[in-house]
Amino acid sequence: MSSITSCPSMPQARRGYFQGSHPATIILASFLVLTLPMCILGAAYPALVQRFYINVIHLWLLGVTHFVITLTIYFQSANLRYFNSTWKNRVIYFLIPLAIMVFFDLYAALDLSISWPVFNLLLMAGVRLAEQHHVCRQSFGVTQLFKRRSGQTYPSWMRSLENYYFTALTLMIWLTFLAGGFRPSRGLVLGAVILGSMFLGLFVSHFIVWRKTLDRGAAATLIYLVFQSASACLAMYELSLYVFFLTMHYVEYHVLMAPRCFDIPLDTTSSADRLFARLRRNPVLFYAIIIVVAGIANVMIISTMGTYVVKSWTSWPTPSRMMLALFNGLFVMHYFVDAFIWKFTNPYYRRSLLPLYFESNGPARAASVYAK
């Protein structure tokens, strides 16, 4: 699986990764095995969750690792050549991600959140909106992957309604987050009614497709829509469950990144690819490195911007604080870069990635799946 080819050409035609049963099963099972039990635990025993740092460990092992693993795309020579091919690409893949990291690093190191409290509130609200947009756009994209995997023909208007639904879901999660949970205000109730109507329309439409075909893939698509919506409802109802709402998002990202880490062809003439080949040769070691780096990042983020900010933080020299706050922009950088590296409408990603997930001779309409 980690063999190196002589050039970064397209993979050979074969059954795509997402056409197998395991990726979909893992994604759907994550709701029942992880999301639901942890939400019940968080709602019924919040003191236990806090005492044993369950939310912090959850964020580290699933959340921060999913941020860190995005950086692996920079180890692959074909990606680096594409990123460096035009000035526009250099700005998108190098300059802006670096600027995001530097900004949040300085923001924490210089204690600007204290100096500019109003700006800090607006910034944190904007970051949360960016996160929720990122999460719901991924859910929309993965819905398209599930539909493509089923092989069934869905009306084009369903894709538009799904797009509107996940956009509305983004706004509702954000508004309830700002309100500290769902409150019976006129605006939130109206938003809930609109969102519920859109969900009901999608549920009935997907159910009709499944009922006509009795296809397991169509059933999986419907179940995915229900599970992601249920997760979002839990986050909207109770703010303390927000971190657990992201579980399916984290799991599916790891699942979808697997072929990009282990199956993508590499170039033996490239030092970057030779390094990446060594890293991915042993999957256990590969993920152990990801977990260690994520652990370091998690400690730095919590120490500088998290709930458990160290008491001596303000007395540290600025250079030391800048080093400790190095990873503070990692999450926002991930939101930005991820909006581009999964665009199957981009010819580069369509050529290099589509054959990994689906048969390379599949219908042309597959090119539009998971476009963020």
Image (tube, grey):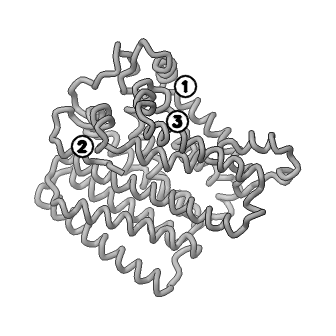
> Considering only order in the chain, which callout, 3 or 1, is on the residue closer to the N terminus?
3
Vertical relation: 341 (above or below) 127: above
Vertical relation: 129 (above or below) 9: below
Examine the rendering and report whether any part of residue 282 can be seen: no
**Residue 290 drawn at (x, y percent):** 56, 34
Kindly identify the residue that appears in the image at 45 percent across and 16 percent down. Answer: 270
* Residue under pointer 3: 71
Question: Circle 1: is it few (<14), some (14-19), or many (20+) Cα within 10 Å?
Answer: few
Mark closer to the observer (1, 3): 3
Kindly identify the residue that appears in the image at 18 percent across and 46 percent down. Answer: 365
Question: Which amino acid type is shown beneath numbered disc 3?
Answer: Leu
* Apparent side of residue 215 relative to residue 248 in the rendered image (left or right): left
**The N terminus lies in which quarter of the figure?**
top left
Kindly identify the residue that appears in the image at 27 percent across and 47 percent down. Answer: 369
> Considering only order in the chain, which callout, 2 or 1, is on the residue closer to the N terminus?
1
> Considering only order in the chain, which callout, 2 or 3, is on the residue closer to the N terminus?
3
Question: Which amino acid type is shown beneath numbered disc 1?
Answer: Leu
Near-viewer residue (198 or 73): 73
Mark on residue 197? none
Near-viewer residue (42 or 262): 262
- Element under disc 1: helix
* Residue under pointer 2: 367
* Residue under pointer 1: 285
**Residue 218 drawn at (x, y percent):** 21, 54
Vertical relation: 65 (above or below) 82: below
